[in-house]
């Protein structure tokens, strides 16, 4: 079975992020590296090409899987990465933090997660 991209879900996510950042669609297009006409076509229900999809997903900072659906209507379950892994990916992608700041925040996250694990075991 093959999965398909949910173009409406992607467009809605783009619109939400665009609105949260106070951007126009043209600004989103410029920043993400796609054409304004691609975003307009998506607004009319068309799917982006692969390069456009990749650029938009990267701009959102979301995994591509978040916009996939499967023919049988069921989302494919997979083991979700540990919270520490997800946070590390987010922090490492930040350009507004120095490497030392990223390392420090990851140490705090690690210590917090270890404490939560101990607390859960003590219950």
Image (cartoon, helix red, strand yellow):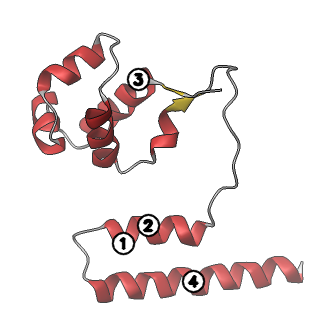
User: Residue beneath label 4, please?
Assistant: 110
Of mark 2 and mark 4, the one earlier in the sequence is 2
Q: What is the distance, in whole Å, between disc 3 and disc 2 at their CAs?
A: 25 Å
User: Residue beneath label 1, please?
Assistant: 92
User: Residue beneath label 3, please?
Assistant: 7
User: In x, y percent, where is residue 63?
Assistant: 45, 48
Would you place residue 6 above or below residue 56 in this image?
A: above
Left or right of 77 on screen, residue 38: left
Q: What is the distance, in whole Å, between disc 1 and disc 4 at their CAs?
A: 15 Å
Q: Quadrant of the N terminus?
A: top right
The quadrant where residue 37 appears? top left
Would you place residue 25 above or below residue 56 in this image?
A: above
Quick one: SS at disc 4? helix
Q: Quadrant of the C terminus?
A: bottom right
Left or right of 122 on screen, residue 102: left
Using the image as rendered, state which of residue 47 and residue 21 is in the foreground: 47
Of mark 3 and mark 2, the one earlier in the sequence is 3
Q: Residue at x 71, y 43 (%)?
A: 77
Q: Which label sits on residue 89?
A: 2
Q: Residues within 10 Å of mark 3 (few under 14, many from 20)?
A: some
Of mark 4 and mark 3, the one earlier in the sequence is 3
Q: Are marks 3 and 2 in contact (CB under 8 Å)?
A: no
């Amino acid at each position: 079975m093959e999965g398909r991209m949910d173009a409406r879900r992607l467009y809605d996510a783009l619109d939400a992020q665009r609105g949260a950042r106070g951007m126009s669609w043209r600004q989103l297009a410029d920043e993400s590296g796609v054409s304004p006409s691609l975003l307009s076509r998506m607004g009319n229900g068309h799917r982006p090409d692969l390069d456009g999809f990749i650029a938009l997903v990267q701009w959102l900072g979301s995994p591509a899987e978040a916009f996939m659906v499967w023919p049988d209507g069921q989302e494919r379950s997979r083991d979700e990465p540990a919270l520490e892994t997800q946070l590390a990916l987010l922090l490492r992608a930040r350009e507004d933090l120095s490497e030392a700041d990223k390392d420090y925040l990851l140490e705090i996250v690690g210590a917090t997660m270890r404490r939560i694990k101990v607390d859960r075991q003590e219950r």
